Amino acid sequence: MWQDQRIKCVCDDDVAGVRAVVVGHYVVERFTSLGNVYYCDTGAYRRGRDFTIIDLATMEPVKAA
């Protein structure tokens, strides 16, 4: 899968023609962005982990209350 290759090589080139690509089903320790690709799956199914919610206006993570 291309997201696996991007994160392992720390490829921060933008994906052309789109504002953002939001990637899930690839667990990361914390919200991560490489170029305009945003990795938001922080493993909420695991004990002690939280969901990551993204503010689509800023593409920044929002802390869930």
Image (cartoon, rainbow, N blue to C red):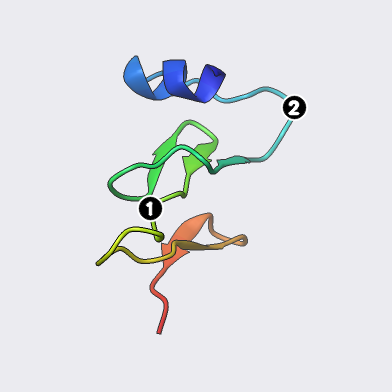
Instruction: In the rendered view, tell whether residue 22 sits above or below residue 59.
Output: above
Q: Quadrant of the C terminus?
A: bottom left
- Residue 2: name its quadrant: top right
Question: Percent from the top left, x then y, of residue 35?
Answer: 48, 31
- Check disc 2 and give the amino acid type: Gly
Question: Percent from the top left, x then y, of residue 49?
Answer: 30, 63
The residue under the point 40% across, 59% down is: 45
The residue under the point 61% across, 62% down is: 57
Drawn side of residue 21 relative to residue 44, left or right: right
The mark nearer the N terminus, 2 or 1, is 2
Q: Residues within 10 Å of mark 2 (few under 14, many from 20)?
A: few
- Assign a secondary structure to mark 1: loop
Q: Which residue is mark 1?
A: 43
Q: Residues within 10 Å of mark 1 (few under 14, many from 20)?
A: some
Q: Quadrant of the N terminus?
A: top right
- Check disc 1 and give the amino acid type: Gly
Q: Which mark is residue 17?
A: 2
Residue farthest right in this picture? 17
The residue under the point 37% across, 50% down is: 31
